[in-house]
Amino acid sequence: MSDYLMRDGAPLTEAEWESIDSTVVAVAKQHLVGRRVLHIFGPLGAGIQSVPNERLAAPSPGAISFEGSEDAAIEVAGRDQTPLLVVHKDFCLNWRTLETSRQMGLPLDTGAAAAAAAVTARAEDRLIFLGDQEAGVEGLLTAKGRRTLALSDWSECGSAFDNLVNAVAVLSGAGYTPPYAAVLSPDLFACLLRVYKDSDTLELTHAKEALTGGVYECPVLGQKQGVVLALGRQHFDLAVGQDLATAYLESRNLNHYLRVMETIALRIKDPGAICALTKGGK
């Protein structure tokens, strides 16, 4: 691992770094939602500060001929540079915690690292789904050109499943093929955890049969927010420069300060593959 993470000179043993790293990766995997529906482009390296984002023109139907006659190629309709933003959270490794582990031969308590990993994972999802207005970056729920569908009253039995199926119909009617996936705010996801009409099956089970890419709960979404996606790297992906890692910052007052960090960029190539569930359909 490159020394820009300041690990080579850090007063931590290889086993202690392994304990921190395994904790960070395990906790991040538990919390990350966006990566479950996005193709990963990379890792490209920490030195990459931006990536090209090519928006593709709507393709014409595939050609059929005897001899393979000339066809209209799928071409780039627009291109820009998308910055890879640094997503991070710092944490403190208390000197007494470290010394207790060393003197008593106990496993290192990595609770602070776990908390930092969870916060970093949520920040990543916030960037993916909501974007960052200050950085001028769009998210899946804020992208220009996305499709929208009015959110129905999910308090009524069966309405949640019906609304999701209608969102799939919007995408499939526009020519987008499966797999489809849904990402929902906690309050909307909870509405799926009930028996569907006269069956003995949860609405969530029915929803997963229609959305084979998965139905996920995402805590960073506000109340009554959701999105249905037609999955595929031709629609959107997540560019990763430096994948999730832990860097050493400094030692202060005997304590050690570290940073869980990554560099990422959401690339939306075809916003038409996004159907946001919104109040009033706007």
Image: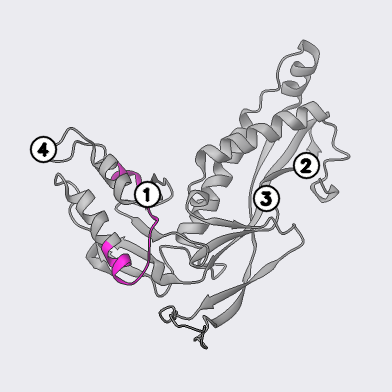
Q: Is residue 94 left or right of residue 203?
A: right
Magenta stretch bounds: 169-189
Are the residues tagged 2 and 1 within 8 Å (C-beta)? no
Question: Pointers 4 and 3 in contact (CB under 8 A)?
Answer: no
Q: Which element carries disc 3, helix, strand or loop?
A: loop
Residue occupying image coordinates x 51% and y 71%: 269
Of discs 2 and 1, which sits in the foreground? 1
Real-space CA distance between mark 4 and mark 2, rounded to the nearest whole angstrom: 57 Å
Q: Is residue 176 magenta?
A: yes
Q: Answer with mark 1 or mark 3, whichever residue precedes in sequence.
A: 1
Which residue occupies the foreground of this view, 211 or 120? 211
Q: What's under tag 3, amino acid-wise?
A: Asp
Image x and y of residue 206, in percent:
26, 44
Q: Which residue is mark 3?
A: 243
Q: Give the residue displayed 37% in from the left and 67% down from the top.
A: 176
Q: Nearer the viewer, residue 180 or 146?
A: 180
